[in-house]
Image (cartoon, rainbow, N blue to C red):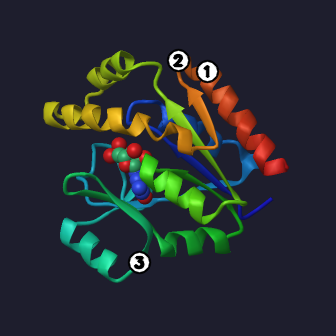
Amino acid sequence: MAGKLVIFSGPFGAGKSTIVKHLRDIDEFALAFSISATSRPKREGEMEGKDYYFMSVDDFRSRIEDNDFIEWEEVYPKQYYGTLKSEITRLTREGNNIIFDVDVVGGSNIKRMNRDKAISVFIKPPSMEVLEERLEQRKTESEESKQKRLKKAKLELTYARRFDHVITNDDLKRATIEAEKLVRDFLTE
Ligand code: 5GP
């Protein structure tokens, strides 16, 4: 079952990273996390080469010029995120399935490029109000960053229909079980 791609997307604060983390811990899925490159500042507790490959805006732009990405997005102004070709080569060579936590544009693009061997799942917050509350509880974001992310989330919700599956995260436990079932079915089909 190696070589399959599992894509999770959705607005910031919808819970996708928690769900992705849960799936990565299931040994039988053999899911290796695609570590993205980003030009956003490192958050407290994040590690280079584990959470992201961190780089400056200039370095990121020069790697775009060099055609080093399978996809990239300027998710927020001057904050680039992208999947390096070298990362996919590395993970594929190691014989893994690959799991992605990417924004909605990146997620739909990776799916489009890999129709048969990919599953794409959109994690939806129950409402904008809940998303706002969840963002409030986060200590990692500045006020400006929260506002940027909320505005962006409204647009991101309109992408849900491009995904194979949509899971509404009104209850994290239930949403996680649903995600696990979808991924198990996909990896064993
Ligand atoms: P964060 O700053 O919270 O880590 O991520 C912000 C957004 O960028 C999230 O929606 C995350 O899924 C997305 N993202 C992370 N890596 C990539 C990537 O390689 N490509 C794209 N298109 N989006 C990414």
**Residue tagged by mark 1?**
173
Q: Is residue 10 above or below residue 106?
A: above
Q: Which quadrant holds residue 80?
A: bottom left
Q: Residue 100: which disc? A: none
Residue 56 lies, in percent from the top left, at 21, 66
- At x 58%, y 44%, the residue is 163
Gap between marks 2 and 3 measured at Cα: 38 Å
Q: Secondary structure at mark 1?
A: helix
- At x 25%, y 34%, the residue is 151
* Three-letter amino acid code of the residue under disc 3: Asp
Q: Would you call the spot at circle 1 few (<14 residues within 10 Å), some (14-19), or many (20 or more)?
A: few
Q: Is residue 186 left or right of residue 84?
A: right
Q: Is residue 18 visible?
A: no
Which numbered disc, 3 or 1, marks the residue that appears first in the sequence? 3
Q: Residue 68: which disc? A: 3
Q: Is residue 22 above or below residue 138?
A: below
Residue 150 lies, in percent from the top left, at 27, 31
**Residue tagged by mark 2?**
170
Quadrant of image for the N terminus: bottom right
Gap between marks 2 and 1 measured at Cα: 9 Å
Residue 5 lies, in percent from the top left, at 65, 57
Q: Is residue 99 above or below residue 57?
A: above
Q: Secondary structure at mark 2?
A: loop
